[in-house]
Image (cartoon, helix red, strand yellow):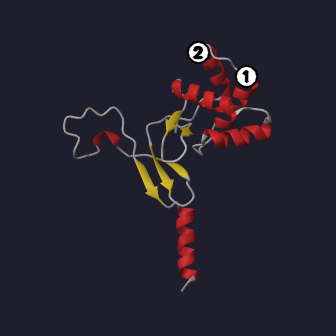
Amino acid sequence: MKSVKSPEELVVAFRAAGLKVTPQRQLLFRLLHGNEMHPTAETLYEVASAEMPGISLRTVYQTLTDLAAMGELQHIQLGGAARFDPNVDDHHHSVCDACGDVRDVYAPNPDHVSVAGLDGFSVRAARIVFSGKCPRCAGAADDLSVSKQ
């Protein structure tokens, strides 16, 4: 998995792009590094504001938007609020219908997937979203059905 660059590398990339590097942005860089949670801007804002009261939601959105424009994050729409994925590798996602957990999913050979109905369509990119229940929620549903018997 190719994760978002280190906070230090993002400082260099932001400066190279002519963008300001503020303490708020440095905090966000740190919170995103190694993050596998596919956070929304609001979720990241909550965590950031706990560490740095006074950080604005606008700063979080702008920083995430800038990172996505630079190719350092993926802006993904999976239903509900937009999420930001620090994993910029080519991959897909599974989304739990019960708890909303989002996980990365990899296709073993994405160049050889057979799809009907694309006659003449020039594919630039493909994103597959698997919906269902994560292991934790599926286990909870199984526990409930057993306890009702």
Front position in the image: 107 or 24: 24
Disc 2 secondary structure class? loop
Determine whether 119 is above or below 130 in the image.
above
Q: Which mark is residue 140?
A: none
Disc 1 secondary structure class? loop
Q: Where does the C terminus fall, quadrant-wise?
A: bottom right
Kindly report the distance in space between the C-alpha atoms of the residues bearing marks 2 and 1: 14 Å
Residue at the image point whose x is 52% and y is 49% from the top = 103
Callout 1 amino acid: Thr
Q: Residues within 10 Å of mark 2 (few under 14, many from 20)?
A: few
Residue 108 location (% of width, % of height) = 38, 46
Is residue 57 shown left or right of residue 88? right
Is residue 145 shown left or right of residue 107? right
Give the labeled residue for mark 1.
Answer: 22
Give the labeled residue for mark 2.
Answer: 17
Front position in the image: 141 or 112: 141
Residue found farthest to the bottom: 149
